[in-house]
Amino acid sequence: MGVEIAGVSLSIGGAPILREVTAAAPTGQVTGLLGPNGAGKSSLLRLVGGIAEPDSGRILLDGVDLAGLPRRERARRIALLEQNAAPSVDLTVREVVLLGRIPHRRGLLGSFSGEGDHEAADAALHAAGALELADRRWHSLSGGQQQRVQVARALAQRPEVLLLDEPTNHLDVHAQLSLLRRVRGLGVTSIMALHDLSLAAAHCDHILLLADGCLVASGPPAEVLRPDTIGAVYRVDCDVLAHPRTGHPVIVFS
């Protein structure tokens, strides 16, 4: 079933942020969450991640209402990588990734000394293409390396659902493509908020397009990313071409 969003609304300080959003993120697929600034993308990710609660509506994981799950279980099943989620102290990369094991600790003051925690951390680093960085200091890494480590930290939770808020921000082209390809290859149900429409078209199986807190369109990239829809949501003129090698939609703005 994956993630189901059923009639979700949210207001902050009396201002409506999301308006009766109903959508789904299919199991094992990568769903791109698109829309202009202020469309409600980050807020929706926080609701799915259990960080905030909707004013109305429900978020379901494999048919189970998240509101009925203990917070610890939610933290084990769903990993949310928010923007600017850097650690405040200069840890090693392995120590940063081990923070993803917090939901699995026994007791509030439990340690990460167990073999299972370190095996999970190393497996996550390997999956994110960052195992060779394990002994480096966090603040010595480039932006692209830090993003890979943050993905590894989320994967160390062994989540069923991976949520990423603008994971390609501040990355160069190579780092963007490398990160998105790795996320796609994980086989984990993933929802990514992205700004670049062509990147989303190339690396997402499914698209949710938001505008002013409402779901405007959902479905495969080729069905959602059409000139008339893009023009209405982003207020721009564009053409949608087929990539000469992959056939994925490529959006060209004029």
Image: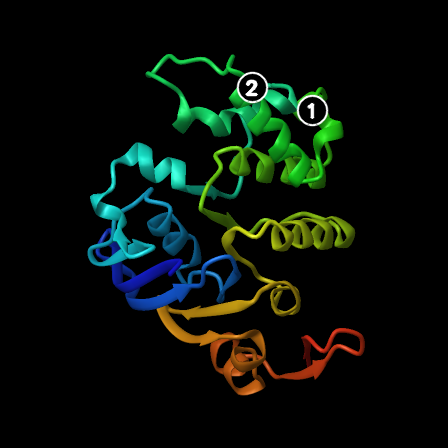
Distance from label 1 to label 2 (Cα)? 16 Å
User: Image height check: is 98 above or below 158?
Assistant: above
Query: Which is nearer the eye, 1 or 192?
Result: 1
Which amino acid, mark 1? Ala
User: Image height check: is 170 above or below 155?
Assistant: below
Q: How far across and down, in percent of the image, does residue 100 sit? A: 49, 30
Whether residue 88 appears in this view of the structure is: no
Q: Which mark is residue 227?
A: none
Give the residue displayed 43% in from the left and 58% down from the top: 41
User: Image height check: is 244 above or below 65?
Assistant: below
> What residue is disc 1 on?
134
**Label 2 secondary element:** loop
Q: How is the image coloured?
A: rainbow
Q: Residues within 10 Å of mark 2 (few under 14, many from 20)?
A: few
Which amino acid, mark 2? Val
Q: Residues within 10 Å of mark 1 (few under 14, many from 20)?
A: some
Q: Which mark is residue 89?
A: 2
Pick whichever of labels 1 and 2 is earlier in the sequence: 2
Q: Is residue 155 left or right of residue 92?
A: left
- Quadrant location of residue 253? bottom right
Give the residue displayed 78% in from the left and 52% down from the top: 174
- Quadrant location of residue 105? top left
Whether residue 116 appears in this view of the structure is: yes
Q: How far across and down, in percent of the image, does residue 202 sit? A: 66, 67
Q: How far across and down, in percent of the image, does residue 196 sit? A: 62, 64
Query: Which is nearer the eye, 85 or 152?
Result: 152
